Image (spheres, grey):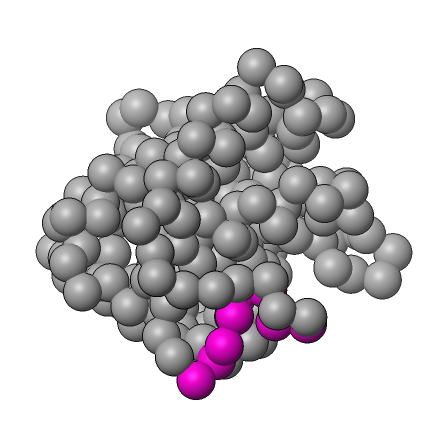
Amino acid sequence: MTVAWTPHRFTGGLLALDTANTVVLRGDPQRMFDRFADPAEIGRFAEAASGYRAAELGGRELVASSPAAIAPVVLSIREATDRLFRGAVSNGALATADLPEFLRACADGLAGGATEIGITERPFGDPATPIAFEAALAVSALSLLRDDTVARLRICPNCTWLFVDRSRNSSRLWCDMAVCGNRQKASRHYRRRKATNEVRNA
């Protein structure tokens, strides 16, 4: 089934988090599903991310010319990123035991690339040329290790997606207020009405 890569799918705030969030409802084996189950979606995701993550990428276009070939590396970075930073949010610190796997996965994403990164104010390199999706994913994932970013990572209480809270007072609750925030409000409203009706009918 083709995925609609809408703005809501890119509410993580960074490419690496948006990618981690392509597994929906982690922790719920009955309802969990992977939007990258079809490797072709990696290419479609990369195309959409070129637009939605243009600011982070410095305008550099993402390319995934052979999604099936890069899928193992992409999935490895995705899972290592989710494990390390979901644990950091839950425990308040990075688990050193998860760092080697994360760093190896990112190294695999950068290996064999014929590109340059780390230009001043352009961490993803020259915007005039495309960058391989797996390489950009590795750069984005490594950027999460900064202290200021780790401190602002959150887990959405509705969908369990990871996101960066960039609000002024670090008080953002939802990955997307228009979607998850409204769903939670509607759910609370329903429960209150149900409780009120049960009391009246008792």
Q: Position of residue 59 (x, y in %)?
A: 49, 80
In the displayed structure, does residue 161 sit left or right of residue 69?
right
In the image, residue 16 lies in the stretch drawn in magenta: no
Main secondary structure found in the magenta portion:
loop
> Magenta stretch?
121-128
Residue for point 31% across, 24% down: 29
Q: Which of 172 and 77 is in front in this view?
A: 77
Is 182 situated above or below 28? Answer: below
Q: Where is residue 168 in the image (x, y as percent from the top left)?
A: 85, 62
Question: Looking at the figure, which quarter contains the N terminus?
Answer: bottom left
Is 201 situated above or below 39? Answer: above
Q: In which quarter of the image is residue 198?
A: top right
Report the label total: 0
Q: Position of residue 52 (x, y in %)?
A: 46, 73
Residue for point 43% across, 39% down: 107
* Residue 158 appears in the picture as rendered: no
Q: Which of 87 and 122 is in front in this view?
A: 122
Is 81 situated above or below 176? Answer: above
* Residue 142 appears in the picture as rendered: yes
